[in-house]
């Protein structure tokens, strides 16, 4: 009895302590100030930005905002406040940067648990770079039924590890021998069986529906499918269609019934046209899309996630890829610049997405300068990574702009991104849901990671 009552007493103290901590964190008012502010939707920056944060939410925002007397004021000086950036195309559980064949071998000999542990670092690096939300579009490990992206998302949500808010696609769906077939390029039967819907491989409308249901059952927030060939797959051509119109119709219908959006990996023009007609929500890459296809996107309101960083990085290290992939990368890169310029000119909705994992995690913001280099205005590039992505990800009611009542996902970068877009690559302050993740230099973990990554990214002779 005495032990029991003591236990009860201790438990009561612990509860009191924890509720005390929770209450003070919720009541703590933080005021962020900086010389400029990008609110995620306006056509220009606001001077002298002030944001009042209480708990996990923004309670006031503007230029002449009253600062509550008990608030902790953080003056970031000559910086620009912005909603946390979003990347609609990452693979936080993978890494294909550096030497392609070495990575490919690693995927075979590393235990999936070890790859998952690495992903914890990739998640931290990404959020510390200012990306407070990612749509993670594909996490597959050959001959493994693990859902590492779901585990990563859940661990972040539960506060076990630090990382961006994640919307995950699990394995993605593709055809036998297509871009997503994890056994493509290896000899037949090496892995003992042909991949099936449990690996995301589906053929025919009914199997496609089954794969969608299987992925949603296992935690997918969004459905990703590869409807044309890809660059980093060894057994297909980069632009061939890999889903029939009937398969695409089943993909979109089943996903939308389950209230999931559909993102399709697609380089080829024919596959893109058929996917847009089937009603997909976003085309990822879109390299070979002809002007008529881009116009169709505009008409249907389909988002384009250009992932310019992917081809940029591959081209800068082209000698490190097998010859067949080199040829595919050259073709896709040559085509994508004109396609992107057309999309900007026609006013297609552009969602910011990079394909992080094809290049080292944390370098996502380099996409901004590439977008501008191909004709996009700085303010529109910033909108693509905030309000546009929030809309595509169906989370615009919570994040994507700096407004009263929204979650306090706020970052700051030095200087003025309209004058020099590369300041987005030097984010110095990150807050996610009211919690400060970074104010000043990156954490030791991220710093160690980036040193390592710089080595990998060193130019090849
Ligand atoms: Zn990708």
Image (tube, helix red, strand yellow):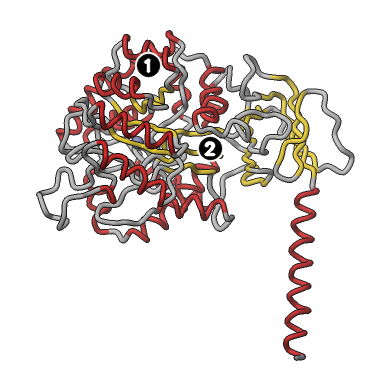
Where, by quadrant of the figure, is residue 371 drawn? top left
**Furthest residue toward right:** 69
Please give left or right for residue 91 compared with residue 201 in the image. Answer: right
**Furthest residue toward bottom:** 1
Task: Compare residues 267 and 193 and report the one nearer the observer.
Answer: 193
Q: Is residue 117 above or below residue 310?
A: below
Residue under circle 2? 131
> SS class of the residue under badge 2?
strand
Ligand 1 rendered quadrant: top left
Where, by quadrant of the figure, is residue 82 drawn? top right
Q: Say which quadrant the C terminus sits in.
A: top left
Q: Is residue 189 above or below residue 135?
A: below
Task: Compare residues 308 and 177 and report the one nearer the observer.
Answer: 177
State the image coordinates of residue 129 (x, y, percent, origin top left): 53, 39
Which residue is rendered at x = 78% and y = 55% of the image? 23
State the image coordinates of residue 202 (x, y, percent, origin top left): 24, 42
Task: Compare residues 18 and 33 and report the one nearer the observer.
Answer: 18
Q: Is residue 181 above or below residue 66?
A: below
How packed mark 2 is, by other alpha carbons closer than 10 Å (few <14, some 14-19, many 20 or more), is many
Residue 340, disc: 1
Residue 307 in sight = yes
Mark 1: C-beta under 8 Å from nearest atom of ligand 1: no
Mark toward the start of the polypeptide (1 vs 2): 2
Where, by quadrant of the figure, is residue 2 drawn? bottom right
**Furthest residue toward left:** 188
Q: Say which quadrant the N terminus sits in.
A: bottom right
Residue 136, disc: none
State the image coordinates of residue 221 (x, y, percent, origin top left): 46, 42
Which residue is rendered at x = 48% and y = 34% of the image? 87
How packed mark 1 is, by other alpha carbons closer than 10 Å (few <14, some 14-19, many 20 or more), is many
């Amino acid at each position: 009895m005495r032990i029991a009552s003591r236990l009860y007493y201790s438990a009561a103290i612990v509860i009191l302590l924890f509720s005390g901590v929770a209450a003070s964190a919720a009541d703590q008012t933080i005021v962020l100030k900086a010389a400029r502010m990008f609110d995620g939707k306006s056509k220009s920056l606001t001077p002298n930005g002030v944001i009042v944060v209480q708990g996990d939410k923004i309670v006031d925002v503007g230029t002449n905002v009253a600062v509550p007397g008990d608030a902790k004021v953080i003056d970031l000086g000559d910086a620009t406040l912005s909603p946390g950036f979003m990347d609609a195309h990452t693979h936080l559980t993978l890494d294909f940067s550096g030497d392609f064949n070495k990575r490919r071998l690693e995927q075979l000999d590393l235990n999936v648990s070890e790859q998952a542990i690495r992903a914890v670092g990739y998640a931290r690096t990404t959020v510390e770079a200012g990306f407070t939300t990612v749509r993670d579009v594909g996490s597959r490990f050959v001959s493994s039924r693990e859902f590492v992206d779901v585990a990563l998302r859940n661990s972040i949500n539960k506060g076990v590890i630090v990382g961006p808010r994640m919307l995950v696609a699990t394995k993605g769906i593709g055809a036998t021998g297509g871009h997503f077939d994890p056994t493509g390029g290896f000899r037949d039967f090496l892995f003992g069986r042909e991949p099936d819907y449990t690996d995301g491989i589906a053929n025919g409308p009914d199997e496609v529906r089954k794969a969608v249901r299987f992925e949603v059952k296992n935690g997918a927030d969004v459905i990703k499918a590869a409807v044309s060939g890809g660059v980093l797959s060894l057994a297909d051509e980069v632009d061939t269609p890999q889903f029939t119109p009937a398969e695409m119709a089943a993909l979109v219908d089943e996903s939308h019934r389950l209230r999931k959006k559909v993102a399709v990996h697609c380089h080829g023009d024919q596959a893109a046209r058929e996917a847009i007609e089937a009603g997909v929500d976003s085309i990822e890459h879109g390299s070979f899309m002809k002007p008529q296809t881009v116009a169709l996107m505009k008409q249907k309101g389909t988002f384009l996630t250009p992932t310019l960083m992917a081809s940029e990085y591959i081209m800068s290290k082209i000698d490190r890829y097998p010859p067949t992939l080199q040829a595919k990368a050259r073709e896709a890169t040559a085509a994508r610049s004109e396609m992107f310029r057309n999309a900007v000119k026609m006013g297609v909705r552009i969602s910011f997405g990079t394909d992080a994992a094809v290049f080292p995690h944390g370098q996502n913001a380099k996409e901004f300068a590439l977008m501008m280099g191909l004709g996009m205005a700085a303010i529109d590039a910033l909108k693509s990574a905030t309000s546009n992505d929030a809309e595509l990800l169906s989370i615009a009611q919570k994040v994507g702009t700096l407004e009263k009542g929204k979650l306090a996902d706020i970052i700051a970068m030095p200087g003025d991104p309209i004058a020099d877009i590369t300041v987005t690559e030097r984010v110095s302050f990150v807050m996610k849901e009211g919690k400060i993740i970074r104010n000043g230099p990156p954490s030791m973990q991220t710093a160690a990671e980036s040193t390592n990554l710089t080595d990998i990214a060193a130019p090849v002779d």
